[in-house]
Amino acid sequence: MRRVIQSFVGKPPMRMLDIPAGAGQLSDALRELGHEVVCADLAQARPDYVRVDMNHDLPFEDASFDAVLCLEGLEHMLEPDHLIKELLRVCRVGGMVVLSTPNVLSYYSRLQFLLTGTLYQFLPANVREIGRDELTDRFHIAPVDYLRLRYMAEYFGGRVESIATDKYKRKVLMPLYVLIWLLGLPWALWIFFGPWANREHMGRNREMFSHINSPALLFGRSLVMFLRKVEHVRRMPSDGIN
């Protein structure tokens, strides 16, 4: 929350959507900065909350917000791609969409997956059995990595401006992380810049390589992605498809 709040300090007043709003701490801080914030959540912690099931279309008009904030929401969704589409739909062109989700590409998560077959913050034994029609939080069921999130954001009209994290995970393992990075660097360079890499998109490839090898993505607990909406996608690919 602190990282996201800092990005809006000193900005002109904006109309924002905070979803899921949780207990409202983020919204309160943004309101203190002079922004207008609409809070939406499945649970209604306060009387002014809009009750929203994020698995469905959001009950807001196209381009109705200057900024849309979705912190720790995607991983709870049955179809996170649909939520990404909706978050960008309700943001105006030129506006900002900020997403955060558990960073499953961190070295700690990779080690957990290597040794246990499970990803960090996605524990199958902790998932509750919930009926299909129950309107409740399903907790962490949908890991979304940086590359998938980037692709879907761009597909629905967004552009990645920057990435960040909240804090580093298991810093005591840093010597091991550095060794793994050195061992994998030649392979990673070949993947992004080798003879089969798409030469028409080398700028994009360099940015992806830079992000994937950044301290935020290698060591961070959460992935925070700042998107700029550059295009309004009027007809979504799912429209009319059964």
Image: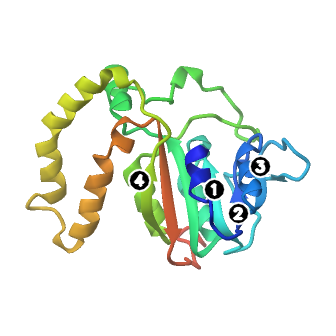
Residue 179 in percent (x, y) is at 18, 29
Q: Please tell me which residue is depicted at 71% across the width and 73% down the height of the picture.
A: 64
| Total count of labels | 4
- Give the left or right position of residue 194, taking residue 153 as reference: left
Measured in 3D between alpha carbons, the distance from the residue under mark 2 to the one under mark 3, in whole angstroms, is: 12 Å
Disc 2 marks which amino acid? Met
- The disc at residue 69 is 1
Quadrant showing the C terminus: bottom right
Q: Secondary structure at mark 2?
A: strand
- The disc at residue 16 is 2
Disc 4 marks which amino acid? Arg
Closer to the chain start, of discs 4 and 3, is: 3
Closer to the chain start, of discs 2 and 4, is: 2
Disc 3 marks which amino acid? Asp
Disc 1 marks which amino acid? Leu
Q: Secondary structure at mark 4?
A: helix
Can I make out residue 242 in this image?
no
Quadrant showing the N terminus: top right
Frontmost of labels 4 and 3 is 3
Look at mark 4 in the image and give the residue it sits on: 148
Q: Secondary structure at mark 1?
A: strand
Frontmost of labels 1 and 4 is 1
Measured in 3D between alpha carbons, the distance from the residue under mark 2 to the one under mark 1, in whole angstroms, is: 7 Å
Look at mark 3 in the image and give the residue it sits on: 28
- Give the left or right position of residue 40, taking residue 142 as reference: right
